Image (cartoon, rainbow, N blue to C red):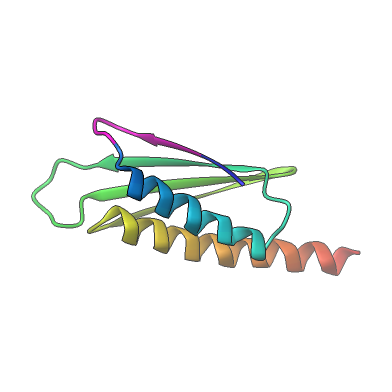
């Protein structure tokens, strides 16, 4: 799957890009018709520890799903977002199968 990553006001490390690609590639196990995904990484300027925001938008034929998570690290935020997307994609796959 093609993953487009954009970061706001900072440079992304290669290890983080590899982690994002590897984690989002697992979504193909739950729904094989994912076209591509967009990932937006932001750092919120607050005194809180949970200031890393990851927005993941997954494009499938005829629809798109977006999940936004805020955590202490980008890896944790991507992992939480991917878990939420897994549930959404499972629901979509089940709904499509029930109509066939």
Q: Is residue 6 magenta?
A: yes
In the rendered structure, the answer to whether residue 94 lies left or right of residue 10 reads right
Q: What is the number of callouts on the image? A: 0
Q: Which residues are magenta?
A: 4-11
Q: Position of residue 61 (x, y in %)?
A: 74, 44
Q: Position of residue 41 (x, y in %)?
A: 34, 42
Front position in the image: 7 or 19: 19
Q: What is the quadrant of residue 62 in the picture?
A: top right
In the rendered structure, the answer to whether residue 80 lies left or right of residue 65 reads left
Q: Which residue is located at x 65 percent, y 58 percent?
A: 28
Which residue extends farthest top? 9
Front position in the image: 56 or 19: 19
Vertical order, 30 against 42 (above or below): below
Q: Position of residue 56 (x, y in %)?
A: 47, 47
Vertical order, 33 against 9 (above or below): below
Q: Position of residue 11 (x, y in %)?
A: 27, 34
Q: Which residue is located at x 40 percent, y 40 percent?
A: 40
Q: Quadrant of the C terminus?
A: bottom right
Q: Which residue is located at x 34 percent, y 49 percent?
A: 15
Q: Is residue 81 magenta?
A: no
In the rendered structure, the answer to whether residue 50 lies left or right of residue 7 reads left
Which residue extends farthest right? 100
In the rendered structure, the answer to whether residue 63 lies left or right of residue 47 reads right
Q: Which residue is located at x 65 percent, y 65 percent?
A: 29
Vertical order, 90 against 58 (above or below): below
């Amino acid at each position: 799957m093609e993953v487009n990553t954009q970061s706001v006001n900072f440079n992304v490390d290669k290890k983080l890009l590899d982690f994002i690609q590897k984690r989002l590639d697992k979504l193909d196990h739950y729904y094989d018709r994912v076209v591509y995904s967009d990932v937006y990484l932001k750092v919120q300027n607050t005194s809180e520890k949970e200031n890393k925001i990851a927005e993941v938008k997954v494009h499938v034929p005829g629809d798109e799903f977006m999940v936004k998570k805020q955590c202490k690290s980008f890896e944790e935020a991507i992992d939480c977002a991917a878990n939420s997307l897994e549930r959404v994609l499972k629901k979509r796959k089940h709904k499509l199968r029930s109509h066939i």
